[in-house]
Image: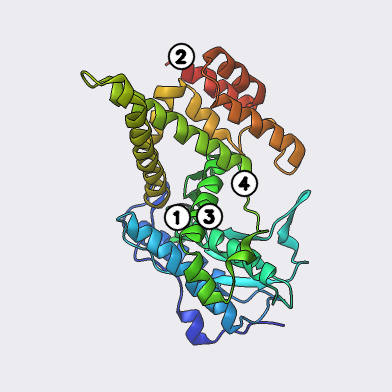
Amino acid sequence: MSYNYSNDQLSKTPMKERYNVIGHDLSGEKETEAQKHIDRKKVIGTARIEGEFIKTPYDLQMIKMANDLVSSEIVNLGIETHCEVLPEQIHFLPNNYKYFKTGNRTRSGFHNAISGMICLKKESASDTAAEKVKVFKTLLHEIIHVYSFEKFYANNFEGGRINYSAIYRSGYKTNNINESDHVHFKGLNEAVTEMLTIQAIEANYEKINASLGLQKSDWNDSKFSYTLERKIISQIIEKLSLSKAVSQVHSQDEVAAKDSVGEIFEKELLARNEFWTKILKGYFTGDMMFLRELEEYFGKGSLRVLSALDGGTKDKPNVPKLHNKINERIYQFFTTDDQTERDHIAHEILNERERLKYLKSKER
């Protein structure tokens, strides 16, 4: 079955008034052409994919609900919302769609950052509550990706036109334009995306269930992804927050010992919320400067270790057992207070490129 788009639908492209674009000599007409080139890529993302299912009214309701949840989260952060993700950007496809399989792993959905296209795995008769929950979770995760900060790279002008463009930043994930396998902050990006997915769902169970005809019990067996990555980010937030709380309490004069524990707990909760808010704002606005707080606490080079999560280590991401072992070591890096142990872990897990940069950062 295919979903046939009308000309009117294809005219409703997810274009923004202006994109963040970098590249060589992007001035005047060239910068304008770069903007138009990305617009053309966005149009391609709305085109029908062979074999995709026709969107049902229920599918459209899921898309609307996911858009509403993400927009609400962004507004709560005090950020202006982006244009919403259109139904035409989303493609429900059968299990055998070739791009769902990557190496030894099979994914339930993915998005293409430069085109804004989302592909979701869907059973042909996805009318069970378990399948609805699974599809909606994946849909929400991928839609959050599309709303995140974007920065594009444009190059190769020929005859006044750009014939090449790529995504440089998507949320926190940063791509090296010249090396396809060289990425930074991929793990952080996925962890934040999934943590926000969980936050939005848990805060809106009743609203989601009422809209999609689900019960709270339907979510009991649902599993969320990027468990180790989320564990690492939570550990970082916990460590930084506790340190800040203790410092604030101990810096006050004449704090009674019996009041210190309670005050530290209150300040730690406040610090956790503040840092989590910084992370979310950075995800949507592109600000990353606050991440330098990690180096103040965990030492020089710690940001290099975080940036290598899921992208700069010695393992192969498509070999889950080895990949998880590496990520457990990264968790230990951010758990220990022993700097010598941190240096040992960094040397053990980082690939040669990132290990050399880690050592160089220690010299600053």
Q: Residue at x 52, y 59 (%)?
A: 114
Where does the N terminus fall, quadrant-wise? bottom right
With 318 as the anchor, is 229 left or right in this view?
left
Q: Which residue is mark 1?
A: 148
Q: Amino acid at mark 1?
A: Ser
Mark 1 or 4: in front is 4
Which is nearer the N-term, disc 2 or disc 3? 3
Q: Which residue is mark 2?
A: 363
Which is nearer the N-term, disc 4 or disc 2? 4
Which is nearer the N-term, disc 3 or disc 1? 1
**Residue 304's spot in the image, x, y percent?**
51, 29
Mark 4 or 3: in front is 3
Q: CA distance from mark 3 to mark 1?
A: 16 Å
Residue farthest toward the front in the current orientation of the protein = 258
Badge 3 local density, few (<14 within 10 Å), some, or many (20+)? some
Which is nearer the N-term, disc 2 or disc 1? 1
Which is nearer the N-term, disc 1 or disc 4? 1
Which is nearer the N-term, disc 4 or disc 3? 3
Q: Which residue is mark 4?
A: 226
